[in-house]
Image (spheres, coloured by chain):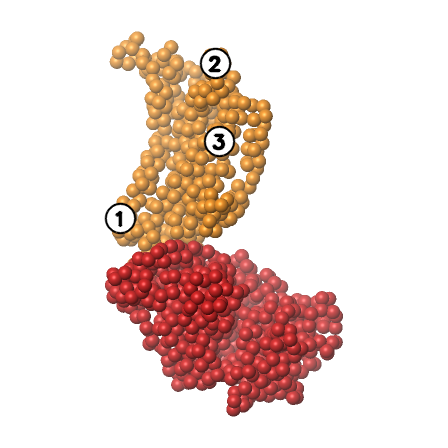
Amino acid sequence: MKRPRFVGGVRLLAAAAVVSIVAVACGGGGSGTSSSSSSVPPKKGGTLQLATNQDVFTHWDPQQEYFQESFAFFQCCLLRTLMTYNGKPASQGGNQVYPDLATQNPTVSSDGLTWTFHMKSGLHYSPPLQSVEITSPDIVRALMRIGDPNVPSGYPFYYDVIQGFSDYSAGKAKTISGLSTPDPHTLIVTLTQPTGDLGYRFAMPATAPIPPNPSDPSAPLGVAQGHDTNYGSYMVSSGPYMWAGSGDLDFSKTPSAQPTLPGLQAGKEWTMVRNPSDTQDPLRPAYVDGIDTSVSPSASQAVLEKEVTAGTIDNVIENGVLPATLRQYQTTPNLKSHLFINPSAGNYYVAMNLGTPPFDDIHVRKAVEYAIDKAAIQRIQGGPIAWPIATHWVPNSLLTLSNGVQVLKNYDPYKTPSEQGADTSGGLQLAKAEMAQSKYGDSSGMCTASACKNVLTLGGNTGTQPAFNSEIQQNLAKIGIQLNLKQLNGSAIYAKLLDPSSQIPLALSPGWLQDYPDAFTFFYLTMYGPNISAQANYNESMVGATPAMMKKFGYSITSVPSMDAQIQKCMPLTGDARVNCWADADKYLMEQIAAVVPLNFTNTVNITGPRVTNYVYNEFASGMSMDKIALNGGTSSSPSG
Amino acid sequence: MAQVGTIPQQTGAPAEGGGEDGAGAVVGRTPWELFWRRFRRDKFAIGGAIFIILLVLMAICAPLISHLTGHGPDELFPFTGLDQYGLPLGPSKHFWFGVDSQGHDLFVRVMYGARTSLFVALFATGLEVVVGTILGVAAGFYRGKVDTVISRIMDIVLSLPVLLLALGLVSACGFSNNGCLGGLIKPGLLLVSYVIGLFSWPYIARIVRGQVLSVREKEFIEAARAGGAGDFRIMWREVMPNLVAPLVVYSTLIIPTNVLFEATLSYLGIGVPATTPSWGGQLSDASQIFNVAWWTMFFPGMFLLGTTLAFNMVGDGMRDALDPKTAALSYKKQSGRKQRKRAEAAAVEPTATQAAA
């Protein structure tokens, strides 16, 4: 869900912004805190009170939103999709998809190119469309909106494996030829290439059904017609909850004259109430009667966390808590039961640009892999709970076989004593041995070439980031690489990184988070050559760039390593073969390319107020499962729907 | 006023004239001696001066202090300075002032912060004094159109929202690699000093202009002019010496303002670069964490407070010492204790003219 972020100031990923303050989404793999609170059987009723100081969900448009928090709201509460998750941790099946609007898992043809979904009948939308049944053309409508050139869609690249999708999004066709609906409860998807993870892609909120407009049945995008950039304010719900006042929507008017959802007040409050059309979906128990989120962009995180401790709010929407709060919850017995730490499938890393000296030499890159003191960075970023050290690229939860074995759990190709890199003599020796083999290094293992002087480097400028940057700067100085460090805020850094012609040699802390629980999401945008683009490039290292691309972006070095073949090999596979294939791709990236230094795998740390009784961690959304939360007693404030 | 006039006459003569040599051996004191005799009686000013001297020594010796503690100013202590949650540890025998939120030795950082604060304050003040004096003298001496133009410029600069402009200028020139104006203004200490200096010179210029306006009417100026002296000679040789006292006093008083201004800019994140230790930056960092790490706010805060207080006390003392008229005029408003002190001071220190007469 989610795009890259910087340690600290995130641009695209809402949650990540919190990181800046210090402790990334984090929490500790090794900590004993459970993923769900053991408690009395959950009671129904009450209104969950949430708060956030990040008003980034300005669209709430299911096809546009690409933030983990919005994925959480959509998945738990507002939107049903053909397939979905159970909203639980990975250990309880949270990384599998289950039939949601579909009656069963899709049937796949032997060549892997035709997928057939059968849909449940008798499911209806929220008011005012409570009499409209959810049918297969509604899913087609959603996919058309994903591919619509006028809609700033969040992740259309996941669907261009569907036959005719590219033509449709290029405006060359009126429909998507690979989608057919022989009857209202069947959807047949024809692909251009076998795609083992298509089930996950049909669990993304963007594929949730869009109802037809009863007043204008011919509108190709149904009720979303005419709302290319703002359907969020007119969205009809299919889940157990809906935005308050959904019944006030009036699709008989022209799009610009339609009233917006009263429950969505940008920058102030988002209010969800029960959807009367809901039919007790077994995957979403929906204990609370409503979910209120107060949005106060200027509120300090520390103050919001204090309110959680005091019980005036139940949870802050964020994927990290401040270190001081974490320490308080870890060390205070009656608070500890309201602290939840779960691994979330994300990482932070150092990106070296293969097209800029001295990082065009693999020995220099390997020297950097050895030199960085990951243990010191861990301390600076909030310790092992906040920052579990990573020794390879893909988070272990995505490289887990069906028998539960994590393939690369003990894989550490650049092991140094206590992970302290060049801050130990052993680590420094390893780093220098690599540097000595490079064309830029001398025989003592120091980089003496001018390419190692004044290496332009981007790092964050808030929270612990200056210390983080300075640690890496000191590590690399030990092998003769001198950084010209520019400390900027997260969005300024991304503005530079998204454009490959900026030719930034070193970026200290970009991050990546899974879109869905498959390692594909860790390679496709970040390491796959064909996806390097001028406007939105997430491949900071330029892995797989063709000489033509390198030339186009002004690089003097035009030949860089690629792992496209390794990625393509895994794409059609399924099951354990797929997992093993991605693990091999990870090893290839670490050993043969060494373009990134993985620093950590993220954890999600959450605290809840005293009346929250049934915390369940939603692996898919890397956060709290709001449909499974229950509240103690009758202390709930009045529902505001 | 009556009191003031009488006391020196009653007790001054014996104290002054009744020296070892008796009558006839009355020696005129140099202005410096007079200044020093008055100044040293002001305990607060002396205290402030001692503090400033120590501070300057500290700033100069910061690398030495860093060497003695074995802790570099940019060195991080993730394992000895941060706890397992990444939170800084408090004062201890290894870290006298504790550790800051990043993991630096706060003691060493505060010492280096003194360098930043003093450099910016002194440089900016110097800039202000130079620009303010030149323009103030020109306006006061030439009057007429020159005065009108300069005075209006001063009015404009004074009416600018300085902090907002500083925010804008520092953000525009501070974040890009090449700075502004084709690389003329580059981010860093100098930019901050320029910003402070160039927005504050009218305060000095106004005072200077006022002084010059009155001085230029004095007989000795007329005499100089009659003797054939040119404008520049008159300004430099006749007018300037009369400006030294107010300039010294006023500069001392604007130094603390500039220290605070630098701290404010750094607090807002637009002052010196984040990696350069500065008290304002340290206070800004502390604001995130002071509820669990009081020392991060306490030590830089105390040094900032001490420095501004010290400069203010010294400035105050210098004003009293350099300008007996100010002291006399403000008598009625002074507290009893201070009145006595002044009276005593006046009693034993007739001015040079009195003594000579």
* Residue A377 relative to residue A491: left or right: left
Secondary element type, mark 1: helix
Choose mark 3 or mark 2, whichever is in front: 2
Of all chains, the one bearing label 3 is B
Q: Nearer the viewer, residue A148 or A631?
A: A148
Tell me which numbered mark, 3 or 2, is placed earlier along the sequence: 3
Residue B221 visible to an observer of this rendering: yes
Circle on res. A625: none
* Residue A173 relative to residue A536: left or right: right
Q: Amino acid at mark 3?
A: Gly
Choose mark 1 or mark 3, whichever is in front: 3
Location of mark 3 (residue): B132
Q: Nearer the viewer, residue A157 or A53?
A: A157
Of all chains, the one bearing label 1 is B
Location of mark 2 (residue): B228
Q: Amino acid at mark 2?
A: Gly
Secondary element type, mark 2: loop
The reply to whether discs 1 and 3 touch (Cβ–Cβ < 8 Å) is: no
Tell me which numbered mark, 1 or 3, is placed earlier along the sequence: 1
Q: Amino acid at mark 1?
A: His
User: In this structure image, what is the colour of chain B?
Assistant: orange
Location of mark 1 (residue): B67
Q: Residue at x 49, y 37 (%)?
A: B198
Are dots 1 and 3 on a single chain? yes
